[in-house]
Image: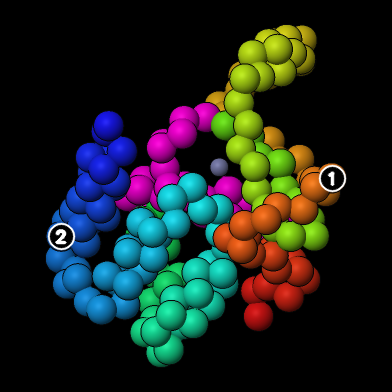
Amino acid sequence: MSKQKGSDLVRERFYRVFLEHNLKLTRPRRALIEHLMAKKGWHFQAEDLLRELNEKSPGVASRATVYRTLDLLVDSEVLTRTRVHENSYRYELADVEGHHHHMVDIRTGRVLEFTGDEELHRMLDRICAEQGFKEHYHVLEVYGEFEQAQQSGEDVPLHDPGQLGN
Ligand SMILES: [Zn+2]
Ligand SMILES: [Zn+2]
C-alpha cells in the first residue's frame, strides 16, 4: 500500500538534491531521475545508465553529465556506490532495502540481493574481534553464475573492468 508513496518520496529526494545545489531540473537530469525511478532495484554501472538513457532518447545526456550527476547523488546519499573492481563502481538507490549483499552473475550481470545472514554477520564479528579489528562497514559481493538463466530482459551485462576508465 505504501509502494506509490515510497517512490514519490524517492523522487522528492532526487529533486531536493538539485534544489539544494541550485541546479535546474534540466532535461538530462529529469531523464536520469525518471529512468532510475522506472527501474526500481536496479544495480547499474555509470556506462549502463548512459547507454540506456541514450537508447531511449538519443543525445539526451552526455557522459560528463551522467558522471557528475551520479557523484552528486552519491554525495547526497540518495544513491550508494559500491566499488566492484579496481576502477569500476556499481550504483543503487540508497537505503531502500537496507543492508544487504550481492550475488553477481558474471555472464549476464544479473545482481541478486540477499539478506537473512545473521550467522554470517556473527561470524564476521567474531573474526574481527579476534583480530582486534573494529569494523566500520563491509561489502560482500559473490561472483558466479546462476544455474538458471533469468527470463526477464531487465539485466544488463557488466562491463569488462579492463575497458573502464578510458
Ligand atoms: Zn553484511
Ligand atoms: Zn543492492
Q: Measured along the vertical axis of the image, is residue 107 above or below residue 53?
A: above
- Residue 123 in percent (x, y) is at 74, 13
The first of marks 1 and 2 along the sequence is 2
- Seen from the viewer's position, the closer of residues 17 and 52 is 52
Q: Secondary structure at mark 2?
A: helix
State which mark lies toward you, 1 or 2.
Answer: 1
Would you say residue 92 is visible in this rendering? yes
| Quadrant assignment, res 36 | bottom left
Quadrant containing ligand 2 reads top right
Measuring 73% from the left and 75% from the top, which residue is drawn there?
Answer: 163
Measuring 64% from the left and 14% from the top, which residue is drawn there?
Answer: 118
- Residue 158 in percent (x, y) is at 69, 63
Residue under numbered circle 1: 147
- Seen from the viewer's position, the closer of residues 94 and 7 is 7
Describe residue 141's horizontal placement relative to residue 62 as left or right. Answer: right
Q: Measured along the vertical axis of the image, is residue 1 above or below residue 60?
A: above
Magenta residue span: 75-99
Q: Secondary structure at mark 1?
A: loop
Which corner quadrant holds the N terminus? top left
CA–CA distance between discs 1 and 2? 45 Å
Q: Amino acid at mark 1?
A: Glu
Describe residue 78's horizontal placement relative to residue 111 as left or right. Answer: left
Q: Measured along the vertical axis of the image, is residue 50 above or below residue 58?
A: above
- Residue 8 in percent (x, y) is at 23, 47
Q: Amino acid at mark 2?
A: Leu
Mark identifier at residue 19: 2
